[in-house]
């Protein structure tokens, strides 16, 4: 186990290093930069562009800029946001908890809905309830998050005469949950549909195994067979897809935070990309890459907890 953890740690470091290089280079391959945008927006003399680029340090060689960024990142210095002229950490830090709560609630909603309904659909195969749940799962996979979010907003206006607005002022945890529950349900609906379908197919495969039939022949109850014997083994591929959905949920958050006007990390990332605010974009994408790598590691650890047969030898 010890050698495995060391190998995984080194692989994580190497992956994050490769991602940092890719992010840094690709961002600068995009035509235009913050100096071009500021000059075009203000109508200033084009000669000002060189002065702005020099002040922001984007006229230096790419390698020098990269070393400066990584060096600052290792010290916890994320640089300055070009647009607001404030430290990048001050722009990013307040938005992280908002997106983290939204993503956590969305995954919680997806698992809470997807796993039980997937099990019920498999146990009640080809029944009316099974067909109904399969229709729900197909609708979740078919409806885009932005369109579903707009439908929810229009329904809220029609029924309640208002739209849900996120208040960014400090408030309690329960108020946060109440304000983010609707956007979380919207962004988590697709993930719940995917988890439901995978849980159903995995459960059906496990329920046909010999050991399940043996358990039934020994007089085990349906609940014991379905949950003690079948579900635990059926959860391995489900855990994988939950990890993938959790890691890449930011794609859904970009749309959802924009539709519901939530001042989170994903929406801020889109604004920073439009302004070519390099420090913000670089650090936010690196944060996303770190989350993806960590989630993959946690999924591997969850395999061992769910299946004792899986061992990572020294």
Image (cartoon, grey):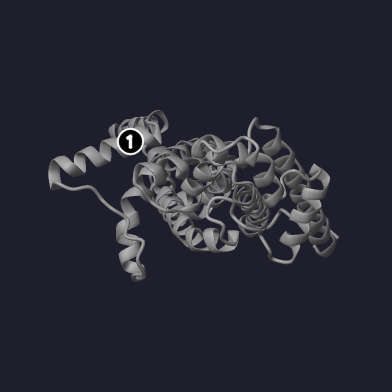
- Residue 254 visible in the current orientation: yes
Q: Which residue, given by chain and number where applicable, does mark 1 sit on?
A: 148
Indicate whether 116 appears above or below 175.
above
Percent position of residue 131, x then y: 33, 30
- Callout 1: SS: helix
Percent position of residue 31, x then y: 65, 30
Quarter of the image with the C terminus is bottom right
| Residue plotted at (26% across, 51% down) | 164
Q: Quadrant of residue 240?
A: top right
Percent position of residue 97, x then y: 48, 62
Front-lying residue, 44 or 133 = 44
Percent position of residue 254, x then y: 47, 42
| Residue plotted at (27% across, 35% down) | 151
- Across the whole image, how many numbered discs are drawn on residues? 1
| Residue plotted at (63% across, 33% down) | 32
Left or right of residue 301: residue 312: right
Front-lying residue, 247 or 257 = 257
- Residue 14 visible in the current orientation: no
Circle 1 crowding by C-alpha within 10 Å: few under 14, some 14–19, many from 20: some
Left or right of residue 281: residue 166: left
Left or right of residue 84: residue 141: left
């Amino acid at each position: 186990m010890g050698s495995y953890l060391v190998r995984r740690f080194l692989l994580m470091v190497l992956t994050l290093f490769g991602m940092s290089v890719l992010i840094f280079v690709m961002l600068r391959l995009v035509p235009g930069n913050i100096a071009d945008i500021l000059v075009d927006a203000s109508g200033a003399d084009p000669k000002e562009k060189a002065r702005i680029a020099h002040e922001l340090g984007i006229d230096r060689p790419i390698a020098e800029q990269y070393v400066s960024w990584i060096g600052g990142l290792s010290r916890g210095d994320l640089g300055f946001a070009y647009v607001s002229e404030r430290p990048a950490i001050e722009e990013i830090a307040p938005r992280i908890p908002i997106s983290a709560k939204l993503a956590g609630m969305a995954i919680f909603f997806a698992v809470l809905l997807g796993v039980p309904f997937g099990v019920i659909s498999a146990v009640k195969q080809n029944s009316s309830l099974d067909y109904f749940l399969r229709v729900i799962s197909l609708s979740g996979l078919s409806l885009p998050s932005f369109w579903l979010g707009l439908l929810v907003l229009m329904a809220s206006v029609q029924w309640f005469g208002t739209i849900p607005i996120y208040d960014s002022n400090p408030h309690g945890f329960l108020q946060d949950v109440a304000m983010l529950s609707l956007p979380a349900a919207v962004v988590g609906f697709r993930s719940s549909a995917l988890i439901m379908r995978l849980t159903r197919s995995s459960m059906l495969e496990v329920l046909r195994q010999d050991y399940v039939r043996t358990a039934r022949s020994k007089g085990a109850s349906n609940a014991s067979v379905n949950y003690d014997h079948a579900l635990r083994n059926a959860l391995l591929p489900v855990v994988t897809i939950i990890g993938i959905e959790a890691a890449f949920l930011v794609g859904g958050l970009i749309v959802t935070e924009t539709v519901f006007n939530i001042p989170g990390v994903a929406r801020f990332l889109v604004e920073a990309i439009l302004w070519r605010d390099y420090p913000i974009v670089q650090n936010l994408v690196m944060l996303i890459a770190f989350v993806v790598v960590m989630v993959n590691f946690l999924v591997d650890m969850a395999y061992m907890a769910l299946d004792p047969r899986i061992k990572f030898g020294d």
